[in-house]
Image: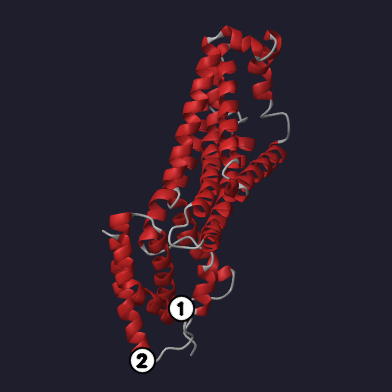
């Protein structure tokens, strides 16, 4: 499909759809026309997504379709009334749209961390440069574990959540620079690799995984999501497509603020796991099982619920709350 030619051929209808969806009052002829344009627009969106995937043109058409759909179903203006829609449609759609970036960041982190761990375990001189043998042994045999039980569980969970949420917020806020996110991702990967290298060098690799995996599965995934959101904002600035840079930043920024809210929630859950499950006396398999279950639920929400929301025309843009409120038919 030639997307530019397709857009030129249908943009007039899409503009009319958007105009009618935002109009406060519709007469009978306009209502019929809105329904006709909605059906045609839904077919156009399906064709665009099938041929070109996620595009700026498709995102704008999705927003117009969402506004039109609200004319048929009605919309509550109150904030609390919009909460179910936020969690059922907007948040999963926003997460789904950055899924490939999340996967790329996860793979990069895994590769870098593995290379550093192998470098340290395979080169005794590198290990010696990290510190004195007594200090590294104390870290592997005592400090690594004591970190998770030094403070009361509730206090520790709150401290971990605050720290991780702050890092995630910085990834999204400073992502536009194009430098901060890669720096944080590589720094995190190096830290994990160094810790793994030291633990494995002293025969404590199993201990590391038993303490990292319960909470780390969800925690690291949440950080990857925040990093992907930051990079998405940077890319909107570099390659806005048919939009102006200001429009691209505004549209993607609103959608990725949705991601920031989601990250805060998922990091809160991982913080609870880190505070109450990781240092607990549960069997290792049970602790890792809890972490794996939390990650599986998160991925299901992102990939399955998110895919369904996108197919319904959801963009993940918080501005749709305003569009919905404006599009309620005044009686």
- Secondary structure state at the residue bearing disc 2: helix
Residue in view at x 49 percent, y 42 percent: 294
Q: Is residue 111 above or below residue 43?
A: above
x, y (%) of residue 26? Answer: 42, 88
Residue in view at x 48 percent, y 38 percent: 105
Counting the numbered discs, the total is: 2
**On residue 28, which mark appears?**
2
Q: CA distance from mark 1 to mark 2?
A: 17 Å
Q: Is residue 156 above or below residue 207?
A: below
* Rendered image quadrant of residue 61: bottom left
Q: Is residue 202 left or right of residue 100?
A: right
Q: Earlier in the sequence, mark 1 or mark 2?
A: 2
Q: Is residue 64 above or below residue 202?
A: below
Q: Nearer the viewer, mark 1 or mark 2?
A: 2
Residue in view at x 32 percent, y 77 percent: 37
Q: Nearer the viewer, residue 41 or 182?
A: 182
* Rendered image quadrant of residue 307: bottom left
Disc 1 and disc 2 in contact, CB within 8 angstroms:
no
x, y (%) of residue 80? Answer: 58, 68
Query: Considering the image in quadrants, where does the N terminus appear?
Result: bottom left
Q: Is residue 301 visible?
A: no
Q: Is residue 85 above or below residue 260?
A: below
x, y (%) of residue 197? Answer: 56, 18
Q: Nearer the viewer, residue 139 or 223?
A: 223
- Secondary structure state at the residue bearing disc 1: loop
Label 1 sits on residue: 74
Q: Is residue 164 left or right of residue 256?
A: right
Q: Nearer the viewer, residue 311 or 83?
A: 311
x, y (%) of residue 70? Answer: 44, 75
Mark 1 Cα shell of 10 Å, populated few (<14), some (14-19), many (≥20): some
């Amino acid at each position: 499909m030639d997307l530019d030619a397709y857009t030129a051929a249908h943009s007039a209808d899409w503009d009319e759809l958007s105009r009618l969806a935002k109009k406060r009052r519709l007469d009978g002829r306009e209502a019929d026309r809105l329904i006709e344009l909605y059906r045609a627009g839904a077919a156009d969106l399906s064709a665009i997504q099938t041929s070109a995937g996620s595009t700026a043109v498709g995102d704008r058409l999705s927003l117009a379709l969402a506004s039109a759909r609200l004319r048929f179903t009605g919309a509550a203006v109150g904030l609390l009334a919009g909460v179910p829609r936020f969690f059922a449609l907007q948040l999963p759609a926003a997460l789904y749209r950055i899924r490939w970036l999340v996967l790329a960041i996860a793979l990069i982190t895994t590769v870098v961390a593995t290379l550093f761990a192998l470098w340290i375990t395979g080169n005794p001189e590198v290990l010696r440069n990290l510190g004195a043998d007594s200090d590294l042994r104390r870290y592997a045999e005592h400090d690594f574990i004591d970190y998770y039980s030094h403070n009361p569980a509730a206090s520790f969970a709150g401290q971990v959540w605050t720290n991780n949420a702050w890092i995630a917020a910085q990834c999204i806020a400073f992502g536009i620079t194009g430098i901060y996110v890669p720096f944080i991702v590589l720094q995190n990967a190096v830290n994990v690799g160094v810790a793994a290298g030291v633990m494995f060098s002293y025969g404590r690799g199993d201990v590391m995984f038993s303490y990292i995996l319960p909470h780390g599965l969800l925690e690291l995934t949440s950080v990857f999501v925040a990093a992907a959101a930051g990079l998405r904002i940077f890319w909107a600035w570099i390659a806005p497509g048919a939009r102006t840079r200001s429009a691209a930043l505004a549209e993607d920024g609103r959608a990725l603020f949705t991601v920031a809210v989601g990250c805060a929630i998922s990091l809160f859950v991982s913080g609870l796991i880190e505070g109450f499950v990781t240092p607990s006396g549960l069997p290792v398999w049970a602790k890792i099982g809890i972490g794996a279950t939390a990650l599986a639920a998160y991925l299901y929400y992102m990939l399955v619920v998110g895919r369904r929301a996108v197919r319904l025309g959801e963009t993940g843009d918080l501005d749709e709350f305003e569009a919905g409120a404006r599009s309620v038919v005044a009686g």
